[in-house]
Image (tube, rainbow, N blue to C red):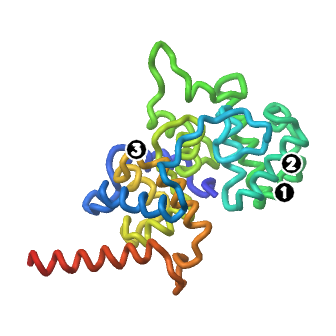
């Protein structure tokens, strides 16, 4: 989980790479390459048009996670619950939290014995750590603002809204909130252009050669945030996760077939031809 990175380090990384890549001399992906992969995945997963952003709504199902709700603090808690587990498990954990404390009863969650929070989310995995993270976030928010709300992150005040960078800095200032989690809030809850890198996106980005081999997940997100065109960030994120979850052939050490592996072979061949023709 993101809590293994100190807040100071998170904020330093955000400040260092908010407008530039950590790999400034690494020219991939180009905008055309990002679009090619988007089109390949859209066709493979029978998506004839770009996946459309969904404006978060208060759905009848209160177990929505990964930011797909309009309450920013609820979206943040749901995204924390989604860390290092499946969608099914995180939804079950959110449903358990709501069943025990009531939906968005943040005050009750914040002051409850931590063991009670742990039991309510145990089915989601890493319950001990996530319970502490959730309580710390809630207590920090209340301490800063006097209420359990982060709605100001998406609010417009006198015609002005917070920038993506300002929102990222605030979210990263909370213990247990890393770049991926913060990016998910921007992308799914606040309807901003951001490119979150989870385990699937990270693996596929390495397969595609979009980041240097030495890149870790955090630096991969910082690099792709700069390289991926804004208009592709939502759709490409969604499609890469969909492909990563369903395609067995692109997994590490797998010899199975994968459309992205075939694409990479074509890119290698094209590069070799261009090098031969333009020595």
Badge 3 element: helix
Q: Image quadrant of residue 89?
A: bottom right
Q: Position of residue 132 (x, y in %)?
A: 76, 48
Counting residues from the N terminus, which is met first, the one under dot 1 or under dot 2? 2
Q: Residue at x 54, y 79 (%)?
A: 249
Eye-nearest disc, 1 or 3: 3
View extreme (top): residue: 158
The answer to whether marks 1 and 2 mark residues whose Cβ atoms lie closer than 8 Å is: yes
Mark 3 closeness class: few <14, some 14–19, many ≥20 residues within 10 Å: few
Q: Dots 3 and 2: beta carbons under 8 Å?
A: no
- Tell me what residue is drawn at x 57 percent, y 72 percent: 247
Query: Which mark is first along the chain, 3 or 1?
Result: 1
Which numbered disc, 3 or 2, marks the residue that appears first in the sequence?
A: 2
**Where residue 77 sits in the image (x, y, percent)?**
71, 43
Q: Residues within 10 Å of mark 2 (few under 14, many from 20)?
A: many
Rendered image: mark on residue 96: 2
């Amino acid at each position: 989980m993101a809590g293994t990175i100190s807040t100071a380090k998170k904020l330093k990384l955000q400040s260092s790479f908010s407008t530039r890549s950590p790999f400034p001399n690494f020219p991939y992906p180009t905008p055309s390459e990002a679009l090619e992969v988007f089109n390949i995945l859209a066709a493979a997963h029978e998506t004839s048009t770009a996946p459309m952003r969904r404006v978060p709504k208060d759905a009848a199902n209160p177990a929505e996670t990964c930011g797909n709700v309009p309450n920013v603090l609820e979206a943040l808690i749901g995204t924390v619950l989604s860390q290092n587990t499946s969608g099914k498990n995180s939804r079950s954990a959110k449903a358990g939290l709501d069943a025990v404390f009531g939906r968005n009863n943040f005050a009750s969650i914040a002051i409850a014995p931590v063991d009670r929070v742990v039991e309510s989310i145990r089915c989601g995995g890493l319950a001990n750590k996530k319970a502490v993270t959730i309580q710390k976030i809630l207590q920090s928010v209340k301490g800063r603002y006097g209420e359990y709300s982060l709605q100001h992150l998406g609010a417009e005040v006198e015609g002005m809204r917070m920038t993506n960078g300002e929102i990222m800095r605030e979210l990263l200032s909370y213990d247990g909130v890393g770049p991926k989690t913060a990016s998910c809030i921007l992308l799914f809850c606040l309807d901003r252009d951001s490119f979150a890198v989870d385990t699937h996106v990270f693996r596929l980005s390495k397969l595609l050669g979009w980041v240097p081999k030495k890149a870790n997940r955090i630096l991969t997100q910082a690099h792709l945030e700069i390289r991926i065109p804004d208009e592709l960030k939502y759709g490409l994120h969604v499609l890469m996760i969909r492909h990563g979850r369903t395609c067995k052939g692109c997994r590490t050490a797998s010899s199975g077939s994968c459309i992205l592996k075939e694409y990479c072979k074509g890119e290698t061949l094209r590069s070799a031809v261009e090098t031969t023709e333009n020595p």
